[in-house]
Structure formats: structure tokens, C-alpha cells
Image (cartoon, grey):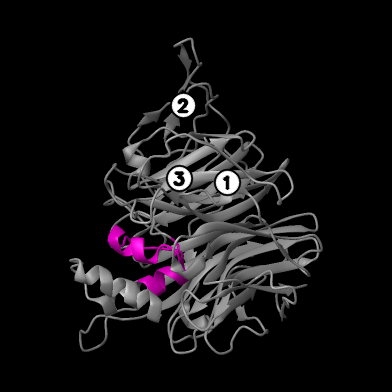
Amino acid sequence: MNDLRGSLEELAERGSPRPVDEVAAEVERGLAAGGGRRVPWMVIAAAAAVVAAVVGIGMARLGDEDAGTFVDTGTTTTQPGLSTSTTMPGETTTTSTEAGTGSSSTTASTAPPREPGAWQQVDPATLPRYEDAVLQAVASDGKTLVAVGAALGSAKDAVVLYSTDGVRWEQAAGPFGGPGFQYAYGVAAGPSGFVVVGSDGPDIGQEDAAVWRSADGRTWTRVPDPGGAFGGSGGQIMQAVAFKGHTVVAVGIDVPQLSPFDGAVWTSADAGVTWKRVRGQADLARPSHEYIKSVAATGSGFMAVGWDHHEVSAPPVAAAWASPDGTQWRRVTVEGASPHSSMNSVTAGPSGLVAVGRTEWAAGVWRSADGQRWNLVPDDPKVFGQRGGSMAMHAVASTPTGFVAVGIASDAAESAWWRSTDGRTWSRQGRLPPDPWGTPHGVTAHGGTHVAVGYANRPAEPNGDPSSGSDPAIWYRH
């Protein structure tokens, strides 16, 4: 962390109110956790090249909430030109307005045939123990779930867990450790098994991208890099990965000596066995600084989302890129791409593409029929939080009953989750139990079960001293 710490010390000399050691520790946690807490933008300016930029987090709870429940107040939101549905009891009803006519109508749809029950947290005592760890992503192949993250204590190794039911988890076997820092950020399932992506290096800002493969999620091998596709000057980090048949696309950032940083893409045509770095794409290396956070396979290719900074010290602006094959990329139009906005996760479902993140410190949802233009779902403060607040969505997944998203509802990192049957109408359902201060960063569907992963801050020490660590956290709903 020497280069990063030096940059932070420079900021401290300019008037940063926080101790360098405290900020550096928070940046390291943010890197592995994908950015769960708000950090001053002066810190992001120094660390944006090596951390998942901080997503805005939450507003105070509204009304009376129990774990997994939110009582709706009857607020209506409107998105021009879209058909609408009245969702399940306790959710927001959306009224459609036909574009150009000014007329509106409200229609009701039948409740989904099987929506899972309330969220439950996996007993932390049953999970493998780490000195200090987070989970960032989770994926399912229909039979096995794989959750990935990083241990942030003295070991600083990648963490990979597997489960068949979302309740009982085991530590996977594989070469996840070694000297320096090994982090696992993303995971995806394909026809030949799983691929995990991340980074490995002697220090923050000096990483190379890293890839692991497994046929069953239980036993893993490290993918070699004889051609040097994973390395380069400074740091290269793979943040997310997606399959389309046997083609695999990984996305992230390239950090040549910390600044400037650009979006980075890698592809594999053989299910992750061999890799090439995508180069020569102007829209991934504009004068601004691109950060690609998530990728999904679509009917017409691949969709990537993230944000950019017009200059390193500027706030992020939501951004999206489309590709027909993973090698040719084009920046596409994002409605509501204003300062302090970011697209943190993207997924494809039967009703189209959905991306989630934040808009001016409120949670944000975008929809697209084809990935070429993204429309912002209208604001509803009771669902997405007040502008200028701290609510944010970290991850979204397509499910048999629609979409589910997880994130944060307050500055104190209070958890939150949302659901939608069609991507148009959303309701905030409350928090993930039992600890409201758990921070979810990934979510997926596993048959009829939903699974979310993240971390939970440890309770205060018996002598009253505040906790300084975190443990992996996993939630499920059957």
C-alpha cells in the first residue's frame, strides 16, 4: 500500500480531516468489498484507480419495518411509454403514461406463482473462519452456488466458498493464497463450470489480473498467463465476469501507476482456459477515467456498466458499454448520468436488461430493451431514498419471479433489499436480518432460492472497545 498511502498523505497535507491510517484501512476494505461505505471524494480521487468507487448508502428506515418487510404508503411512480402492473400487496403501484399522448391507465397483474419467503442469515458460526473477510459476489449453475471474496487480515488471500442449498457452506480447495494480496471479485457459471476473477500482486496498485476455474465449484485451479494478458504497468484488476456459451468476458480496470485509469476487458473463447486482453477500443480509454464494475451476457452480446470521472478528482457519472462479441465495445446512452451517479450491477431477464446503482446519493434503477439506450426508472423517495441521501443498490439478479436487488439504506451501512416483477415497478422490502448493519454486495437466484452475500461488522469487544473487523455474511430466502 505504499503508493496508495503516499497519495493519501498528500491529500492529508491539503486538509483531509481524517487520519491517513484510518483512510488507508477503509480503502483496503472498500477494494475487497466493492465499496460499501461512503468515503470523501478527495480520498476517492487518490484511490479511485484501485478501489471499487464508493456507492452511496441509504436513508433512514421509513415507517415500521420488520426484517424482510416494508409497508408501502401507496406512492405511484410513472415511466413514460411503459406498460405497468400492480405488484404484490405492500408494494408500489406504477401508472403508465403513453408517450406523446398524456393519457394514462393503471393495470393489475397476477401475483407471481411462487415468491420466496423471508430472508434468513446463515449462522456465522457455521461458516469458515477468517481473521477479517468479506464476500463480494455469488453465482449458481443450478446445482451449486459459489461465493467469492477476500480475507483482509494477515493472510490477504482470496476466499471461495460453495454450497448446494445456500444454507450449508464449505471452503473450496484451490490455490487461493500466496505472497502478497489475492482478491476474488467476481464469479460466473457456464456450461463447463465456474470462473472466478480477481487480482494478485505484492501490494495495492501493483496487482495483475487473476483467474481461477472449476468444473464443480469445489476444486479449483489457477489459470496460467504465459502471454502476459493479465499483467502490465501498475495494476490490473478483474471486477466481474460473464459467460455466453463458451465465450467468457471479464471486465475491470487498468491502473498504470495509479493515474489515469481506464476500463479494461479480457476475453476467452474456450470457457476461461486461455485469455486475451482487448485493446484499441477508444470508448474504453477516453480522456476521462472509466471504471467497469459489472458485465452480463445478453441476447445480442455483452453489456458492461460502471462509471467514469471526467477528471480524477471529479465525482463519478454512470456509464454503460455494449459489445456484440466481447471484443468490440461502444459507449451507449444512459439517461440520468449526472454527477454522483454510478451503475454498479447489470443483469438480463425476460423483460429486458436492468442495471442498478445510485443517482445523486439515492438508489437508482435503469432499464433497457436492447442495451443501446438506458432509461432511468422514475424516482420515488420512499423506494429509492432522497436525493442527497445515502441509499444505493449494490447488486441485482434476475429471478424466476422478476428481479431482486440488494444494497444499503443508511450512512451506517444498514442493509436493504428491493424486488420487482418486471424491472419497471420496484418496492423496498426492508433490511436483511438479523443484524441491520450487514452489508450485502452480491445476489443471485438458485432455483427458487435467493442468496445474497457480503459482510457483517463484528460486535464491540467485551470491554466496550469498538470492533475493528468483519466476517463473511450470507443470507438466503426459500
Mark 3 neighbour class, 10 Å CA radius: few under 14, some 14 to 19, many 20 or more:
many
- Mark number for residue 283? 1
User: How many circles with numbers are drawn on the protein?
Assistant: 3
Q: Which residue is mark 3?
A: 318
Instruction: Identify the residue at image location x=55%, y=24%.
Output: 83
Is residue 40 one of those drawn in magenta? yes
Residue 89 appearing in the image: yes
Q: Which residue is mark 2?
A: 79
Is residue 186 one of those drawn in magenta? no
**In this rendering, the label closer to the viewer, 2 or 3:** 3
**In this rendering, the label closer to the viewer, 1 or 3:** 1
Residue 306 in the image: above or below residue 45: above
Q: Which residue type carries mark 2? A: Gln
Answer with mark 2 or mark 3, whichever residue precedes in sequence: 2
Q: Quadrant of the C terminus?
A: bottom right
Which is more toward the observer, 162 or 202? 202
Residue 99 in the image: above or below residue 307: above
SS of the residue under disc 2: loop
Left or right: residue 187 versus residue 221 is left
